[in-house]
Image: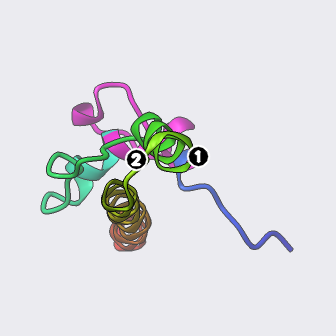
Amino acid sequence: MQRLFDLMEIFSKNHYVHHDFRGGFSIKDVLPVLVLEMSYKNLNIRDGSMAMNAWKTMMFEAKIQQEKDKIKHDLLKYCELDTLAMVKIFEVLKKL
């Protein structure tokens, strides 16, 4: 029994299409359309590339503990929103 399902498949396989996705189907494309009150815009880390770079900086380049703590905080905020976004998108889809 498969216990995991990638919500992206719903959008990438065109089971749910919205013109405001602008042809995209990533969480960054879908979230602002389906869950209006949620956005990555106010975060210091707004996408996966930024998260990878921040992690690298925290692990290998940051010398001051305060800087490491700030990056860790920003990464946790990004991960928190990513996780909550998936839950909220799932809740919207369940109502369809």
Q: For the C terminus, which image quadrant?
A: bottom left
The spot of residue 52 in percent (x, y) is 51, 40
Packing grade of label 2 (10 A; few <14, some 14-19, many >=20) is some
The spot of residue 22 in percent (x, y) is 28, 26
Left or right: where does residue 26 sit relative to residue 39? right
Instruction: Name the residue: 30% across, 44% down.
Output: 46
Which label number is shown at residue 25?
none
Q: Quadrant of residue 72?
A: bottom left
Q: Residue furthest right?
A: 1
Q: CA distance from mark 2 to mark 1?
A: 11 Å
Q: Nearer the viewer, residue 56 or 83?
A: 56
Secondary element type, mark 1: helix
Which label number is shown at residue 27?
2
Instruction: Name the residue: 40% across, 57% down.
Output: 68
The spot of residue 35 in percent (x, y) is 22, 60
Q: Earlier in the sequence, mark 2 or mark 1?
A: 1
Q: Quadrant of residue 37?
A: bottom left
Packing grade of label 1 (10 A; few <14, some 14-19, many >=20) is few
Q: Quadrant of residue 71?
A: bottom left
The spot of residue 76 in percent (x, y) is 39, 65
- As shown in the figure, which amino acid type bears the numbered disc 2? Ile
Secondary element type, mark 2: helix
Give the residues drawn in magenta, as a range. 9-28
Residue depth check, mark 2 versus mark 1: number of the one nearer the observer:
2
Q: Nearer the viewer, residue 35 or 53?
A: 53
- As shown in the figure, which amino acid type bears the numbered disc 1? Glu
Please say whether residue 54 is one of the residues in the magenta stretch: no
Q: Is residue 22 above or below residue 67?
A: above
Left or right: where does residue 53 sit relative to residue 21? right
Residue indicated by mark 1: 9
